[in-house]
Amino acid sequence: MRDTCTACLGTAFLGFTFSQLTSCSSLPVFKTNLSGKTVSVPFTSFAESKLVIVRDMQVAYDILVVKKSDSEYNAIYMKCSHQENPVTATETGLFCSAHGSRFDLEGNVLKEPALHPLKKFKTETSAESLVIDLNS
Amino acid sequence: MQRPLLILSILLTVFSTAFSQVLTREDSLSAGLIRSNNTTVLSGYGQLKFEYDAKLKTATANLTRNVLFLGHRFSNTIYFFSEMELENAKVVGGKASGEISMEQLFLKFSLNRDMYLQAGLFIPRIGLINENHLPTTFNGNDRTFVETFVIPATWREIGVGLYGNVRSLAGLNYSFAIVNGLQSGGFVNGSGVREGKFEGSNATASNLAVTGSLLYYYKNWRLQTSGYYGGSAGLTKRQADSLQLKSGPFGTPVALVEGNAQYHQNGVSFRALATMVSISDAFEINRAYANNTPGKMIGYYAELGYNILRAFKTDTQRDLTIFGRYEFMDLNYNIPENGIKNGINHKEYMVAGITYRPVHGVVVKADYVMRHTGSRNEDLIVTPFPQQLPYYTNNGFFNLGLGYSF
């Protein structure tokens, strides 16, 4: 009886997990090249999603750009403030797989062990693109 | 008069220069503000606890642990991490008291932005508490009992691990590691495989273990499943043959599977975990060592909490969480023919309490633990002590404690 219950619980758990997996998709990735100390992301990159991962191979970690409005963006460095692990971005926040820290889409700590928010870069908008200042 | 002052000022300058290279926060290394290599970081965490036994009417106060973290960045891709732990405040030569040990010591090599390797003494991703064991990250003064006895957190061994996330599916992470195996001769009835760990100390690496996990973040959920399979003979073929145990890298195997889920949103927190350990050669282990090893152990728990400060203010950094948790484990779920059942290995815990975080990194905890077990098998007490305390199948413990991490 207990064996059966355990098997049922395990099957239900795995079934739920994988049924949810198939209903998800990845965030769009925009690959770019560093220009001076800035990175430009065309506004067309946000056509599919309000969240875009910006990847520049000269920059050690990805940057998650969150479009809050046409003129307001968050550019969050995807490096955990706890032990430098790369964080995972989803539509609801950022997560560190190493120790369980959790951040909101402003980079604020929602769950420890991280004690400090994620680093945010200043952004400016030009006619056709968003400019992220990596010096900020 | 002026000369001592001059010497003092020189010394202060020298010391301040020297110590300015050693940062005092583990996460300063990673704040992104320090771009130079060769950065050394000092940090730590710890907890202490007062416990009152409701049946025996006795109390204990203990500095449970203090852990010093030392990290160093050699380059943008190579890092050193170490944690040295002192349990129970002091270690006295020749006496049963505290313990000093390395909780982790490994080098991490970033392969690219999605993958890294770590090699050394590290904690594989098995369960929740194992990797995330800082006292500021869980409710209650004690780590969950299931993840103490069934999953022996903090379970660290020497090996190599690959960690990464799947680019094509946001939120999906994986890990795979090869570590040294366990020592079945060390298993103690009632504590699962806990006493069979090597924890980096002269491990018999002739038996190995593989472990892997899948971790997925979906909306406000964190879902994980992991497994472990490894040998536990740790002997030469000749020795193993003489004890009629299976030798080889995966001889006399121990297998573990677990699944867990966590949820956080609007001050509500939920976590649950279920796990099973299987020791298929338990009969042979008992025949060799007479340590009453079980064939199977199971455990599960579920916890619900709510940060009541969220009811009054949504943006507060403080946290006052009330929580309740139920835990069940059976460390004798299945025993071989030559094993002896002991009722105290069938345990239930009900834990209720509060966790107060005045700032990030500090917790004040109060909880009450109700423990219910089966009866003790008196046949297992070979030489009874005349003043032996009675065993209560129902007991309660009031705990008060502090925790910190920085």
Image (spheres, coloured by chain):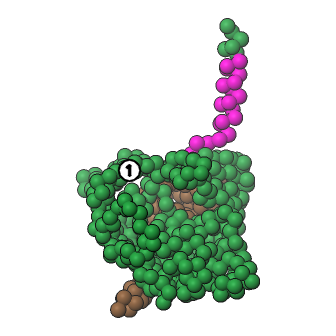
The quarter of the picture where residue A32 lies is bottom right
The amino acid pointed to by label 1 is Thr
Asked whether B24 falls inside the magenta stretch, the response is yes
User: Where residue B377 appears, x then y in whole percent?
Assistant: 38, 76
- The picture places residue B289, in percent across and down from the top left corner, at 58, 78
Per the rendering, the colour in which chain B appears is: green
User: What residue is shown at x 69% (from left), y 60% (from top)?
Assistant: B107
Q: Position of residue B281 (x, y in %)?
A: 57, 87
Residue assigned mark 1? B60
- Front residue of this view, candidates A121 and B274: B274
Magenta-span inclusion, residue B223 = no
Query: Does B243 appear above or below B163?
Result: below
Residue A97 at least partly seen: no
Q: Chain of mark 1?
A: B
Magenta stretch bounds: B7-25
Identify the main secondary structure in magenta.
Answer: helix
Question: Residue A18 versus residue A113: which sits nearer the camera?
Answer: A113
Quarter of the view holding residue A7:
bottom left
Q: Is residue B362 above or below residue A15?
A: above
Q: Quadrant of the N terminus of chain B?
A: top right
Mark 1 is surrounded, within 10 Å at the Cα level, by few (under 14), some (14 to 19) or many (20 or more) other residues, namely few
Residue name at image x 71 percent, y 11 percent? B3
Residue lying at 59% horizontally and 69% vertically, measured from the top left: B197
Q: How many marks?
A: 1
In the rendered image of the structure, the colour used to display chain A is: brown
